[in-house]
Image (spheres, rainbow, N blue to C red):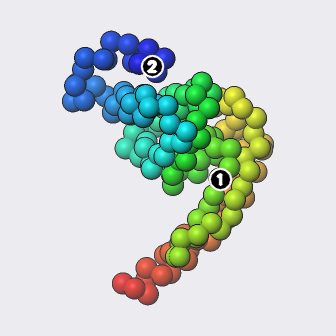
Amino acid sequence: MMADAGLSGSEESYPGEISSGVRRRVEIVRALMNEPKVLLFDEPYRALDSLTKSVMHEALLETYYKNKVTIFFITHDLDEALFLGHRLAIMTTRPCRPKKVLEVDIPHPRDYGVLTSRRFRELMDETLEAVHEEARKAFDLGEREG
């Protein structure tokens, strides 16, 4: 599994001796060792630079294609959500409930060429509208409470 994740040679390394991107891949391999039916990722790439993040996106998709495990991926990065997802749930601010569920009908397997496709931009426009509305509500609520 380490070799499949591009981690050959890292098996004996301590976490402080490897990059954050490699640590994230090791975490995914560790989670997959138990052959789960579902993986939950809560903003796993928030601290990564954009180049490392793009490589991690590709690695996660490869993992999905090989293992066919269901992945719940929580993120505030809309490009990331649309690139990785099959279905996108946009949540309300308070109370937190699904506001809109969007089917991402961009074919798999995906590569970064989809980011400039017309369909990706259409889905992004639809997503941005719903997210901006909730962001405005959260902002207004914060002003009243502060």
Q: Amino acid at mark 1?
A: Leu
Rendering coords of residue 57 (x, y %): 53, 34
Task: First in sequence, mark 1 or 2: give its number.
Answer: 2
User: Can residue 97 be seen?
Assistant: yes
Q: Amino acid at mark 2?
A: Met
Q: Quadrant of residue 83?
A: top right
| Mark 1 vs 2: CB contact within 8 A | no
Q: Which residue is mark 2?
A: 1
Q: Which residue is mark 1?
A: 88
- Give left or right: position of 122 versus 69: right
Q: Nearer the viewer, residue 86 or 54?
A: 86
User: What is the crowding at mark 2: few (fewer than 14 residues within 10 Å), some, or many (at least 20)?
Assistant: few
Query: In the figure, 31 relative to 12: above or below?
Result: below
Rendering coords of residue 102 (x, y %): 72, 55
Local secondary structure at mark 1: strand
Q: Quadrant of residue 132?
A: bottom right
1 vs 2, front mark: 2
Local secondary structure at mark 2: loop
> How many numbered callouts?
2
User: Can residue 54 be seen?
Assistant: no
